[in-house]
Image (cartoon, grey):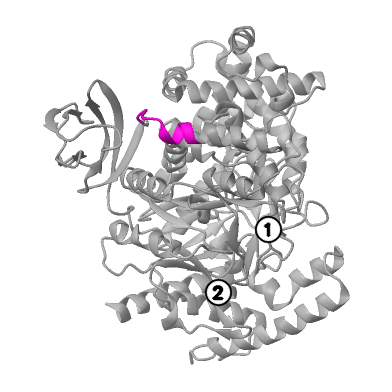
Amino acid sequence: MSDERLEYLARHAGLSVDWIDANGQPQRVRPQVLRQVLAGLGHPADSLDEIEKSLRSLEEVGKSVSLPPLLTVDLGRQLKLGRWFAAHSHCQVLLEDGSQHETQLDEHAALSHAIPIGYHQITIERQAFTVAVAPARCYSMADALDSEAPRAWGLSAQLYSLRREGDGGFGDTQALELLARSAAERGVDALAISPMHAMFSSDAHRYSPYSPSSRLFFNSLYAAPGEILGERAVRLAIEQAGLDAELQRLEQLPLIDWPAATTAKQTLLRQLFNDFNRGDNPLTSDFDSFRQAGGEALENHCRFEALQAECAAKGSAQDWRQWHSDWHDPRSEAIAEFSRTHADEVRYYAFCQWLVARSLERAQQAARAGGMRIGLIADLAVGADGAGSQAWSRQDELLSELTVGAPPDILNRAGQSWGISAFAPEGLQRHGYRAFIEMLRANFAHAGGLRIDHVMGLQRLWVIPRGNSPRDGAYLNYPLDDLLRLLALESVRHQAIVLGEDLGTVPDGLREKLAARAILGIRVLLFEQYHTGYFKPILQWPDNALATSTTHDLSTLNGWWRSRDIDWYRDLKLIDAPGEQHWRETRQHERQGLRNVLAQDSHNFKDNAEETDQVIDASIRFLGHTRAPLVLIPLEDLLGIEEQPNLPGTTAGHPNWCRRFALPSVDLLDDEDAARRLELLAQARDQAGERDR
């Protein structure tokens, strides 16, 4: 077999055969890995004949004169159409507002007619397509705060960790609403939350918020039905279902028991649905309009949930890739027949989506009404599970046979496999970026901002054949400029800021492109070192990235200072003795370095308080003084908690995504440490604003 032809095919399919690792060293993907990744992309390459056939197929697509259903262009720039049309071709432009214009292409076959931002219909020579005209940048912090030098601040929270009386064992949108009101009273502008994506209702053991079934819909467990249907309806449903004792038991647990808590919440939702269906409920019309507005996408998700529940009840495979072929196509007659015979089940899942969407809407309204200038910042996971709803309903646009991860890098020397699938670049383009646009709209809908996990995925993703080691993958390239234009357009439409999590191996030039589009990067205090123990001073922090103390995948400040993360890796036997010793020695240098940079502020380390508390206070004051347009402090650091929410690389041994706060969310910010640190942050932000004006 010719490796040269194999590599030519790989590059033609959008793969990077050669790449630079986190240490700046050149790497090359092995031929066997290329063959496996190409197969996952739908381009067989196990023989020279298959390579040539796949190449011909790709080249035919490349030479095709067929017009894509959607093209993107920046506002005020020419749309070049010479590939499909001749110069001076007659052109009809139908704008979103219904107005029509007649024009013609110029001598270079470009559309120069001034078109406003939005999605508009163009017809040339009886061929119709959509053009998405994008603003120059996303809705920015400057826009949100009406300031050229914004210095806002906020909090970040793991939603499930919140607590309220009667929550049934984990946080929900009612606890979130209470926290939002409390935070707004204290001058907080933003509240970033963990992903609320739809999970697998039939499998309570899958609860990682970054491995969802769908990024189009919400996890119905987070719904606060009392906020929508009334507390009396919820109390009656609890009594009818005999849930009172179980809900109280779950509420008292120190860690979330997801399987038991999920069963209890779903039992409650079922009872509420049955009660809702009896007689005339004044909210029925709102539910019906919600379902109608959700259209095919919502129906497909609800059908998928019902199909999985049916499989779970029968003990058969819940992975749609293992279903009978009649169930593979969401538009098949078999699926339509199933939906007719299980109409009440499908309606139940739509009811759950209605409850959680309306509940989240309330939380954002409460945040904004309380005075937050941004409000909730939603979190968009980098992909969805290949066995889930989104992969099933958008099969041509998601890569269900490849999983996404990261090659070995500074954060994880073994590489990472996240067990999720990502968009197929070819499929996105074929379908006019439908799946990407609908995903953005769903996540912007009830938020003032959106954090994009692993934002590098807009340019390239490390894709791994299912079952392979994370080392045995390759970078798949994406149409970055098109995706950035669509992101900017939807951001401005929804008046929501965009944050891009850019930690790890970042391609050259990407941060500059993101900054030009007003997408804030993320700078984490613990990583902002020139080299071990030499932390960047305040004035060297950038003004195009948010600043934070840590993330959900890293130690809290308390845990980092005490080396709690190293203890965990040792106890779980994830490092050997020499590795542990080296790590602890490095940490000691880092601790001294952090203290040195913090001590440059004379206000720090002045009293006799416990050292860790002083370090946390000083760190928060330090972050507040940076030029970052937005500073976000995790609630764990505000409270001085030692344990972190998630320990990457573990699926057992560490209670990932199960920790809860001891205090109810309405009282969290009244905690003595939290109140003091909020005041420190507010003062530092004010001083930073005065300094930079």
Q: Quadrant of the C terminus?
A: bottom left
Q: Residue at x 76, y 78 (%)?
A: 583
Determine which residue is flagged by label 1.
Answer: 645
Locate the N terminus and report the quarter of the image it occupies: top right
For label 2, the SS is helix
Of residues 496 and 413, which is closer to you in this image?
413
Label 2 is placed on what type of residue? Answer: Leu
Q: Quadrant of residue 35?
A: top right
Write the start and end of the magenta stretch as one range. 59-67
Which disc number belongs to residue 525?
2
Q: Quadrant of residue 315?
A: top right
Residues at discs 1 and 2 in contact (Cβ within 8 Å): no
Q: Residues within 10 Å of mark 1 (few under 14, many from 20)?
A: many
Label 1 vs label 2, nearer the camera: 2
- Badge 2 local density, few (<14 within 10 Å), some, or many (20+)? many
Task: Give x and y (percent) for residue 313.
Answer: 78, 20
